[in-house]
Amino acid sequence: MSLIEISHLRKEYPNVIPLKDVNATVERGEVISIIGPSGTGKSTLLRCLNRLETPTSGHILVDGVDMCDPVTDLAAMRRKMGMVFQNYNLFGHKLVAENVMMAPMDLLGMPKQEAWEQALKLLDKVGLKDKALSWPHELSGGQRQRVAIARGLAMNPQILLFDEPTSALDPTMVSEVLSVMTDLAEHGLTMLVVTHEMRFARDASTRVFYMDQGEVWEAGPPEQIFEHPKRTETHDFIFRVRCWHYDITSISFDLPGMLASLEQYCLRQFMGVRSANTCEMLVEEIVANHLVPVAHERGLDNPNLHVDLFAGEGGVDMMLEIDYRDLLPGGDPLTDGSQDPISAALVSGLVDHTTMSEPGVVRYHIKRR
């Protein structure tokens, strides 16, 4: 028997049905990453698993016990499942160690000294033993989420549920939380993780669930989901999350905002500093220093430029595509004149080669550096 068996699970609200018909199994020791577009029931599924939400119909068997049966001792079953929320949910009036000690003492009757010793071990496991006597507000977002993970482990659960644990974090803090989660995965803990971090889903998962429209549309090993998806919807989703897109609709556009958005995307894709700098330099040189001035010279308040960056796994084989077709009636600004940005980029070593997919759409192919 599988550790978790979900059959025909449905959850309805008055105006929306987040879960229509979910069927899945999870084996002991598996790490399941749940991915998919926003609003497709991923978080609702986790909340139904530990009965923070009551399913409308269907069954959830956890270690052979039906979580949907009215006679099930939910308190006892929840002790088997820890949960880490996206917004930490730490108690601000309690010290870090007290946050970790609270559940074992209140629910298991663990003596205070034993709970303290266990809290120190768990905080050490997530790299925060030295913060045991700190207050939550004294910690960074990444540190608070690591405390939340330690708290989730305090009941020695069979299953740990993560509801988008990095979504509230600055990109620079994401890696420290993912490192802790990857370590847990390597030690055999059964985990279900709702995540937008595709690198974690690929590298740390035993299987990936792709959810869409309230159902698990595709499930399989990471290699299948990311490299050979069976459904068109899965392929399109994976493609979108690897792409950064920016539209420039005014010659007075927000250049710092665009570059900040690009930088965050590069961080999420684990590109590395040199590759990220290459992308930022290209965008600034081609778009801000060349195409936008040309639009201004030609009297176009709206240059209607579209910039896309596509990144392979880990930032390998990046492609920057710039669509400037609205500038073509006055001549091609990227192929006319002595200051040709395409040739300049090649000569400077910023790109390996360029292609023109059609007039006005140029692609810069960049290898990771």
Image (cartoon, rainbow, N blue to C red):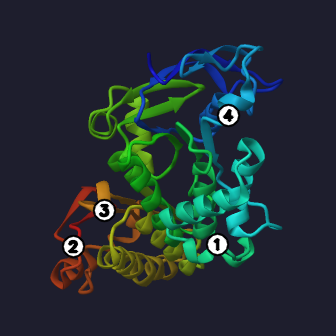
| Mark drawn on residue 351 | 2
**Badge 2: residue crowd in 10 Å (few <14, some 14–19, many ≥20):** many
Residue hosting label 4 = 78
Marks 1/2: CA–CA distance: 48 Å
The spot of residue 353 in percent (x, y) is: 17, 67
Tell me what residue is drawn at x 66 percent, y 57 percent. 115
Residue hosting label 1 = 132
Marks 4/1: CA–CA distance: 26 Å
Disc 3 marks a residue whose amino acid type is Gly
Residue hosting label 3 = 315
**Camera-nearest label, 4 or 3:** 4
Disc 4 marks a residue whose amino acid type is Arg
Q: Earlier in the sequence, mark 4 or mark 3?
A: 4
The spot of residue 240 in percent (x, y) is: 44, 47
Disc 1 marks a residue whose amino acid type is Ala
Q: Earlier in the sequence, mark 2 or mark 3?
A: 3
Disc 2 marks a residue whose amino acid type is Val
Viewer-nearest residue: 304 or 7: 7
